[in-house]
Each structure stands twice: as structure tokens, then as C-alpha cells.
Image (spheres, rainbow, N blue to C red):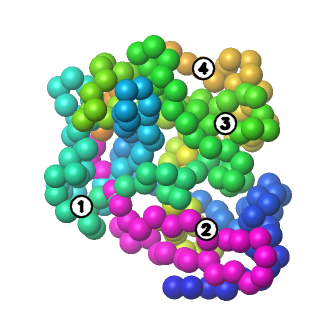
């Protein structure tokens, strides 16, 4: 379904002005048990963030291995309609308070000894926000690391009016300024959280806003069908 919006709406989204972003997108709560936030090993030392969602009860989209790492089981079958997979900024972004911060903040993974930290950062602010963390029992190119979100952080679904979209937010209702203050004081840093058992959880089509900064624009609205 394609809908056309006025240039003013395009300018609003492109500039991501905090006072206006809430008028473009809202968010909806999600069942956290249906999701897994994972770190995928890339090369010898890098990591890639991905989110898996279990749409249908079976087969399982991921499984916990005996060594504590996660096996992305969806790679062994046609997961269409069963699992959703969100693999980059088109599929997930940051939302703080009522602001969509996808154009201002990016998420990155940083290894800290035997821990992995999921951090939100922006060039305009030196303080990074700790969004989640996980324990790294060992590095295995076929084993993903489960990440647990920090208190106050949850996964939510992007929505436009009454329509839910396939985009997922890492969301926190605390105002951004307060989160930055807490992080700068070291109050957001907590001891390593041991990975908890994950329940099965995938991709639906991943959509981005498709908004440009000039002329009438088309915004693809994809209803979410569990």
C-alpha cells in the first residue's frame, strides 16, 4: 500500500526534529519473549547486531547451545511466515521518550573483555547509552551471543496512525537528557548480566520510512500480521 504525504511531512521526518517526530511515528508494545537480541561474530573480532522474532510457535527460530551460545536455527529451514529477522538500521532503531532517534543515533556492539555491550551513540554527544549487554563464553563463528536489554529498555513496534509497521524500536520512556546524565555519571552501567534462556522467536519484510526531504513522497505502510 502506498500513501502520499505533503512535503512538510517529508521535511519533518528528514530533519528528525524531536518536537515533531512524535507526529510521524508512534510505537506499540511487544511480547518480549518472542524476540531474541543477538550479536553475530563477523571476521576475527567484529560483531553484528540482529534481532530475531518468533512469529509461529514452531519450528524454533533459535536454540540455546550447551556452551551458552545461540544457534540461529532458522538458517536450517524456510522461515518465511515463521521467523522475522531484523539485520540493520532499516529493521531497527532507537526510540527515547516520544522521539524517534533513528536518524541521530546508531547502535553498535563493543567487546569489553568477556562481555559484549550494546551501545547507542551519536556524533553530537560524547556520552554513549548502554542499551544491553551479554556474556561471551567463547568466540565461535557459528554461535551467536544473547544480549539482555538494560532496565528501562524494551523492544517496541513502530506504528503510523492505526497501522503497525515491521520496524522495531529499542525503546526507553526516560527522557533523553536524563539518560545522558545517568550515563555520564556511570549510573547506567550495571554488572554483567548472565544470558537468560531465550524462548523461540524472524523476517517479515523490513521497511524503512522511505521519506525524502523534498517534493511529495510515498511512505510504504506495511500492516503487521503476527
Badge 2: residue crowd in 10 Å (few <14, some 14–19, many ≥20): some
- Residue 189 badge: 4
- The reply to whether discs 2 and 4 touch (Cβ–Cβ < 8 Å) is no
Task: Name the one closer to the observer, 57 or 16.
Answer: 16
- Residue 149 badge: none
- The label nearer to you, 2 versus 4, is 2
Q: Which residues are magenta?
A: 199-226
Q: Is residue 142 left or right of residue 36?
A: left
Residue 27: x %, y % from top left:
59, 60
Q: Which residue is mark 3?
A: 121
Tell me, yes or no, if residue 133 can be seen here.
Answer: yes
Q: Quadrant of residue 183?
A: top right
Q: Is residue 209 left or right of residue 216?
A: left
Q: Residue at x 36, y 50 (%)?
A: 52
Q: Residue at x 55, y 36 (%)?
A: 108
Q: Which residue is mark 2?
A: 209
Amino acid at each position: 500500500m502506498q500513501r502520499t504525504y505533503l512535503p512538510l511531512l517529508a521535511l519533518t521526518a528528514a530533519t528528525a526534529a524531536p518536537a515533531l517526530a512524535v507526529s510521524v511515528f508512534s510505537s506499540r508494545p511487544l511480547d518480549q519473549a518472542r524476540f531474541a537480541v543477538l550479536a553475530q561474530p563477523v571476521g576475527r573480532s567484529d560483531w553484528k547486531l540482529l534481532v530475531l522474532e518468533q512469529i509461529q510457535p514452531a519450528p524454533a527460530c533459535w536454540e540455546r547451545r550447551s556452551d551458552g551460545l545461540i544457534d540461529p536455527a532458522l538458517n536450517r529451514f524456510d522461515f518465511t511466515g515463521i521467523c522475522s529477522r531484523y539485520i540493520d538500521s532499516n529493521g531497527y532503531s532507537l526510540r527515547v521518550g516520544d522521539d524517534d532517534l533513528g536518524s541521530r543515533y546508531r547502535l553498535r556492539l563493543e567487546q569489553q573483555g568477556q562481555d559484549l555491550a550494546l551501545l547507542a551513540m551519536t556524533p553530537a554527544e560524547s556520552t554513549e547509552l548502554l542499551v544491553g549487554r551479554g556474556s561471551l563464553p567463547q568466540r565461535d563463528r557459528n554461535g551467536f551471543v544473547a544480549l539482555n536489554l538494560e532496565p528501562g529498555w524494551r523492544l517496541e513496534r513502530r506504528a503510523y496512525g492505526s497501522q503497525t509497521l515491521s520496524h522495531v524500536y529499542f525503546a526507553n520512556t526516560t527522557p533523553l537528557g536524563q539518560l545522558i546524565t545517568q550515563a555520564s555519571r556511570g549510573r547506567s552501567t550495571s554488572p554483567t548480566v548472565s544470558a537468560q534462556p531465550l524462548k523461540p522467536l524472524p523476517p517479515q519484510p523490513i521497511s524503512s520510512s522511505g521519506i525524502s526531504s523534498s517534493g511529495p513522497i510515498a511512505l510504504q505502510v506495511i500492516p503487521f500480521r503476527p
